[in-house]
Amino acid sequence: MRLAILCMHTSPYAPLGSADAGGMNVVLRHLTAEFARLGHDVHVYVRRMDPAEPAVAEIAPGLTLHQIDAGPAVVLPKSEIDAWLHDYTEALRAEPRPDVVHSHHWMSAMAGLELAREWDVPHVVSYHSVAAREGAPLSEGEPPESPDRVAGEARAAREADAIVAVSIAESHTVERIGADPDRIRVIRPGVDLGLFAPDESVRCPKEAPYVLFAARLQPLKAADLAVEAIAGFSTRAGDESPHLRIAGDAGKDFADYDAALEELIDGHGIADRVERLGGLEREDFVPLMRCASLVLFPSYSETFGLVALEAAACGVPTVAAPSGGLHEAVVSGVSGVIVPGRVPSRWREVVSGLLADEDARSALGRSARAWAETQSWTRSAEAHLEFYAGLVAGRSATELIAAARRGGGLDEPRLAIERAARERDHEAVFGDAGRVLLVHAHPDDETLTTGPLAAWLASRGIEVDLLTATRGERGEVRDAHDPELAALDGPERIERIGLERERERDAACDALGITGRAWLGEGTARAAGLDERRYADSGMSWVTERIAGPIDDVDTTTLARASITELSGDLEAHVRATAPDVVVVYDRDGGYGHPDHVRLHAATRVAADRTRTPVVEIVTTGPAATPTPPDLPSPAPFGAHRWLHLPEFEAQVREALDAYGTQLEIAGPDVVHVGGQYDPLSTSICLQRVS
């Protein structure tokens, strides 16, 4: 096949870490080389950025780089490149007709849509990153550098014949901008297992250990969190303070961030422990990676996280944020550790623990290499070529993708490692438990927070019970679902909402396989000798867009005003009556800070201590996570937290969420709450066994 690879804004052969040269460049560099090696005629089209470079150059047999004159032949800020889209597109019209056009990034996709239509050939788009909406947090992606980017990305999502994403996380992101999920093919990138490999002959420096940050310098990549984590070592007596090496440059659009990063380093007084190396060529980067003790990957958002896979191939563990595709690039406990949240003290705890435990670090390095060996560039290239060939043969993207989803195929070795890791983590958290009690504050919490966990435990023959503290009577009601109920006020509203939430909870439990169901303060969940009581929902207010706090008019009937003595007494009665092997509850931050969650955590810990029942906490991973006070033990000591990824239970979770029509709706890959907040429909959960 003749393949036209469009990459207008950057060259796959630019030095990595410089300006706009990052993971996408690595992907294209290796995929195109593999395509050519496998016998295809590959043509890569980039915008000329250097007048001295030839217009056409053979990179390897069968692989040709074309430098297209579109605007001044200099490196431009990405925000200025799309002004030259017309020139780029017009120049390509004279090229021979390919069999497939594969456009990388939104600018190339705009050209690719026109050219593929004229040539009457399949058009495949890969985004590599998607712009966030205006004013959105960095977790939603990078800000649009051009006013046309958001509209261009949406157009490509609608009109491309197919989309190739590097991760499930990226596929969900692309779905949010209008792509049909049945036209999105997920093909993981690979790693050069020969180049990135442990090398016993290399003599690493004997000075203080160093951790490595390798990415472009921009807010999205969060080099500042790496600096904050390392800075904290200087205040902790007895710690061996590691050095931080930063490999990467800031583009012109991020000069302010670059300056702020330098100020942060100076402000902490750690300039002697932070070395900035700029963008590096491969021959310099690989030995730097091999000799690192750890690689830090604190990005707010990642479509995949290729550097983490390269680190794994070198046998170097990665410490990563729970961001998008990093959950797929890093298997926590196999190739590194995914830190729950972005609090610097938590990062420092993990880094410190790994640096202090050479045996644990070495074991992670060995398993990381085994994990990387399942993901070669040849495997990734063959998956692309199989997909291209199907499109050229006239098969629809929907048909090809459905066939790919039915079997593991080339991905089976990787999937086997992921399944084994999940079994190990289940054993560490739940042991041989035959009965698990979930403790939640309101109806829908059991599904939003522990839905995939409940379904998974039930599928293993474990009896799953639910104890809910309130009926969520102070919650809002979606007008579109029940306008009559939404319009009610006063005691009648509270009574009606309570009845509706009881019905919704039962339907959700049926979908998830939760058998035992009880309400706190009633039946077996009331302390002996006390009249039954109905704990009322305390309500909440939004302190920030994502963190909740108490409201002012909380009365004495609410959960938040109930005494810990009374609450823990009721919980103790229920635990003694039902005899669970493990109790699952929120951690001290309550997920997102809801006062009922926080109160219930405290009472559950007291009851569990009295009954000597093991407790598993749901670790807060979002913005509500708080630093550990210096006089308290860490809520997640090194090695305690475990991630469970349970995507095969998504259908059950969706069915359970559908039961809560008064409170939320599902919009593609997201849950839309009654207040308008969007959250990804997650099938991952972070847990820690604390007793």
Image (cartoon, rainbow, N blue to C red):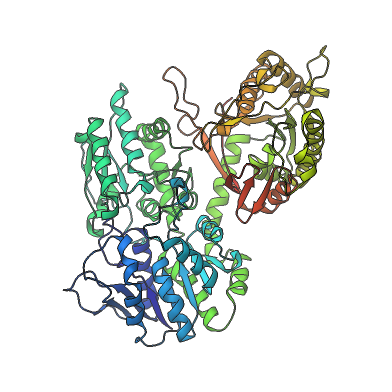
Residue at image point 32% right, 29% down: 232
Residue 426 image-quadrant placement: top right
Task: Identify whether 189 is placed above or below 139.
Answer: below
Whole-percent x and y of residue 43? 35, 79
Which one is nearer the viewer's eye here, 232 or 82?
82
Image position of 63 (left or right of 618) = left
Q: Does the image show residue 553?
A: yes
Quarter of the picture containing the N terminus is bottom left
Whole-percent x and y of residue 357? 38, 33
Residue 463 image-quadrant placement: top right
Which one is nearer the viewer's eye here, 339 or 382?
339
Which one is nearer the viewer's eye here, 448 or 58?
448
Whole-percent x and y of residue 644? 57, 44
Q: How many numbered marks appear?
A: 0
Q: Does the image show residue 335?
A: no
Residue at image point 61% right, 67% down: 182
Which one is nearer the viewer's eye here, 435 or 437?
437
Quarter of the picture containing the C terminus is top right
Residue that extends furthest to the left in the rendered view of this protein: 52
Image position of 309 (left or right of 612) = left
Whole-percent x and y of residue 255? 25, 49
Residue 403 image-quadrant placement: bottom right
Residue that extends furthest to the top in the rendered view of this protein: 529
